[in-house]
Image (cartoon, helix red, strand yellow):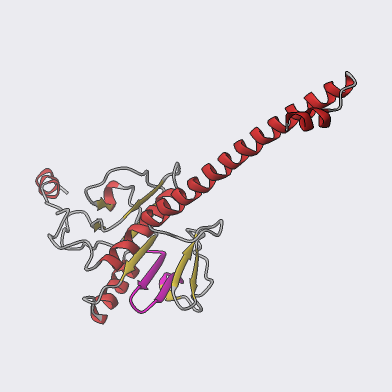
Amino acid sequence: MDASQTSTLDEVVYPESDGKPRADNTLQWDWMVKIVEELRELFAGQKVFVAGDLFWYPVKGDPKTVTAPDALVAFGRPPGYRGSYKQWEEDGIAPQVVFEVLSPSNSREEMDEKLRWYDLHGVEEYYLIDPDKNQLNGWVRRNDHLTPVYPIDEFVSPRLKIRFAVNGEVVLYTPDGREFQTREKRIEELQERLRKVKLALRNAQEAARTDREQSGKDLLAAKLRELGINPDDILKSAS
């Protein structure tokens, strides 16, 4: 490749947005955010890049070969800002795990094409969630091709170590058994936990104060008895 060809490749524009909304509805958006945020927390401090709705360009010089998974995970790549995921700038590492969250506007043909795209470009695990129908499908690379996971219920991701459950609704669990939740739900739970802690602390303080008062009374009664005075007689005379 001569210098002019190199210059041409460097000048190729790789758009970071197609102008379309990130999600078609709040349910799809909540799932996207839930997956990305939980995975970022799961791999915090590790060399793992997690992103949502980010353009992934696998081929340098070819901006038309692109897709934007609803969530992607690239092991061996540091976290941090990306305008897009240009694979040649990421040591040639393709995201190993991708998620798609269906919306009513997604067609069967579109999702079949996504599967072929991920298969061609080296994805190791692909999970497709339909939150409206509470359905989940998964594919794992075997013999150099993405093959369906069956059964998907109680399946554990080889890379992520998270568990999938499908029993009336789709639920994802962290390796320690905690259910994936939206940020709002987790904040609500933390606030409720904080309220309970404050209540328990207040009750403990009141109990301690009552104990101190009772201990003081018991100590005074003991001193009076040492002096030959019956504390009950004092109480009777006071009444």
Decide which of 66, 204 is in the foreground and name it. Answer: 204
Residue 207 figure quarter: top right
- For this rendering, which residue is in front, 142 or 105? 105
Query: Left or right: where does residue 166 sit relative to residue 235?
Result: left
Q: Residue at x 24, y 68 (%)?
A: 25
Residue 81 seen anywhere in this rendered image of the structure: yes
Where is residue 123 shown, x and y percent of the image? 37, 64
Is residue 95 in sight in this rendering? no
Q: Is residue 18 left or right of residue 82?
A: left
Q: Position of residue 197 (x, y in %)?
A: 54, 44
Q: Position of residue 16 (x, y in %)?
A: 17, 53
Vertical relation: 96 (above or below) 11: below
Look at the image and say whether residue 144 sits in the magenta stretch: yes
Label count reads: 0
Q: Looking at the rendering, in which quadrant would you find the C terminus?
A: top right
Q: Main secondary structure of the magenta part?
A: strand
Residue 75: image location, x then y, percent: 42, 51
Q: Residue at x 59, y 42 (%)?
A: 203
Which residues make up the magenta segment? 123-145
Q: Is residue 200 magenta?
A: no
Question: Residue extending furthest top?
Answer: 227
* Rendered residue at 73%/27% (across/down): 216
Whether residue 11 sits left or right of residue 75 in the image: it is: left
* Residue at (54% x, 57% y) in the render: 175
